[in-house]
Image (cartoon, rainbow, N blue to C red):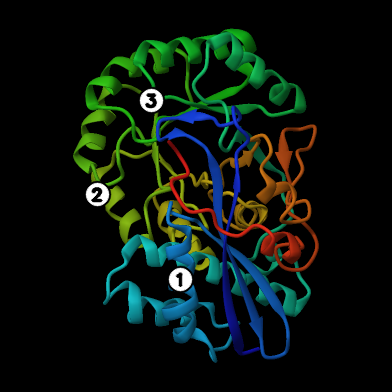
């Protein structure tokens, strides 16, 4: 069960012309990911996803060089020991901060895939969970800037499919954002949860203006109105209304989540298993949040590997929230790279895969046929 090899695949595919969604960070022109393959000396294979961080070739290079040399030869089942080796050898002492957290996340996920496969269990069981129904919201790179009527028509088949919650992209202009939120509430009524993600595009003035409308519409949360390091803005904005503030997809390791408790301004935590330091670290983050009655609504990354792992994780913690279901059109990392990572039930919930490990198979031929495309993913 010792680690024999670590291989990282930076991979991309272009978004068809006219198919990119406009968000607070720009319009998507391609999709990137970093897929991690770990093989043990006995031949057992584990797969994971490291978020691309808009630098997928750099994240893959860190995995292929420094991190690989740190962990090859270690026990694949020793997820805590591997995490600590990387922490001491890179994350804590030689910088790279977020880049290292991104890289180690996919490696850690692959090790958990191996651990569960070694005992023949689905991951949720190894984590101490059960095959529970997990409520899902329609998210991913979707429901972006467009006229309110068009937004409603994009959301309609999602509601008809069974989703009882949707996440809208805001951070455009406050009047346009309010018009979109009002249109969706008017179209679908009080029976659904409406969430909003500003992708760090708001100012304090914007939040002061938008929050009364969000409160009146009973919005579920306002996600990332500001960059994650702007703690002062979050503290001030918390007093502008009742709608909870949500952060976490761009917070790395428990060391960046713990200070949120001091600020007492964030009501929803959203760690991403492919960004925060992996499943090992996400469990620690969830435990910290649980002690303070804070729910965990993980952010989903690009591939079905992350999405399948996230459902297992939510089935194993005591403060689970929504699963972010990627409903974006034409996501080949969800539909072609892997076998079916999840399916929505008529009750608006997803359930974990029952096959050993993450419960998905990777098409390595497809992966190798889609090498990295350089350049920005949003314009």
Relative to 61, 240 lies left or right: left
Q: Which residue is mark 1?
A: 61
| Residue 119 appears anywhere in the view | yes
Name the foreground residue: 125 vs 35: 35
Question: In this rendering, is residue 305 above or below 346?
Answer: below
Query: Of discs 2 and 3, which sits in the foreground?
Result: 3
Q: Which residue: 34% across, 17% down? A: 210
Q: Look at the image and tell me whether residue 281 can be seen.
A: no
Find the distance from the CA under tag 1 to the CA under tag 2: 36 Å
- What residue did someone put label 2 on? 262
Give the left or right position of residue 121, taking residue 248 as reference.
right
| Above-or-below relation of 278 to 205 | below
- Which labelled disc corresponds to residue 86? none
Q: In the image, which is nearer the foreground, mark 1 or mark 2?
A: 1
Which residue is depicted at the point 48% across and 73% down?
Answer: 63
SS for callout 1:
helix
Residue 16 lies, with reference to residue 150, above or below; the image says below
The quadrant of the rendering that contains the C terminus is top left
**Helix or strand or loop: what does disc 2 sit on?**
helix
Which residue is the site of mark 3? 171
In the image, which is nearer the foreground, mark 3 or mark 1?
1
Q: Residues within 10 Å of mark 1 (few under 14, many from 20)?
A: some
Circle 3 — which element?
A: loop
- On the picture, is 207 further left or further right than 159? left
Residue 5: horizontal and vertical position, in percent?
60, 84
Task: Evaluate if marks 3 and 1 touch, with contact meaning CB atoms under 8 Å apart.
Answer: no
Disc 2 residue crowd, few under 14, some 14–19, many 20+, Cα 10 Å: few
- Cα–Cα span, label 2 and label 3: 27 Å
């Amino acid at each position: 069960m010792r680690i024999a090899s670590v291989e990282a695949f930076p991979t991309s595919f272009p978004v068809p012309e006219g198919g990119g969604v406009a968000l607070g960070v720009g319009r998507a022109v391609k999709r990137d990911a970093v897929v991690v393959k770990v093989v043990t000396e006995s031949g057992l294979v584990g797969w994971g996803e490291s978020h691309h961080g808009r630098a997928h070739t750099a994240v893959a290079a860190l995995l292929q060089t420094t991190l690989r040399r740190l962990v090859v030869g270690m026990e694949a089942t020793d997820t805590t020991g591997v995490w600590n080796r990387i922490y001491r050898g890179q994350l804590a002492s030689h910088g790279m901060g977020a880049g290292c957290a991104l890289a180690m996340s996919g490696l850690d996920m692959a090790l958990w895939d191996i651990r569960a496969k070694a005992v023949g269990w689905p991951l949720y069981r190894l984590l101490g969970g059960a095959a529970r129904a997990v409520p899902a919201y329609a998210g991913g790179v979707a429901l972006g800037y467009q006229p309110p009527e068009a937004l409603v028509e994009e959301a309609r088949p999602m509601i008809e499919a069974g989703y009882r919650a949707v996440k809208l992209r805001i951070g455009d202009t406050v009047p346009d954002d309010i018009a979109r939120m009002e249109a969706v509430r008017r179209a679908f009524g009080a029976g659904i949860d409406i969430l909003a993600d500003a992708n760090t595009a708001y100012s304090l003035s914007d939040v002061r203006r938008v929050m009364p409308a969000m409160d009146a519409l009973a919005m579920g949360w306002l996600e990332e109105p500001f960059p994650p390091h702007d703690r002062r803005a979050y503290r001030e904005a918390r007093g502008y209304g009742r709608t909870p503030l949500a952060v976490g997809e761009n917070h790395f390791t428990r060391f960046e989540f713990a200070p949120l408790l001091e600020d007492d301004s964030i009501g929803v935590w959203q760690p991403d298993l492919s960004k925060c330091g992996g499943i090992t670290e996400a469990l620690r983050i969830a435990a910290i949040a649980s002690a303070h009655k804070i729910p965990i609504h993980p952010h989903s990354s690009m591939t079905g590997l992350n999405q399948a792992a996230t459902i297992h994780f939510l089935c194993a913690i005591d403060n689970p929230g929504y699963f972010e279901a990627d409903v974006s059109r034409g996501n080949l990392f969800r539909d072609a790279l892997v076998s079916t990572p999840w399916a929505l039930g008529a009750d608006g919930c997803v359930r974990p895969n029952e096959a050993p490990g993450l419960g998905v198979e990777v098409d390595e031929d497809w992966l190798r046929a889609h090498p990295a495309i350089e350049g920005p993913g949003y314009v």
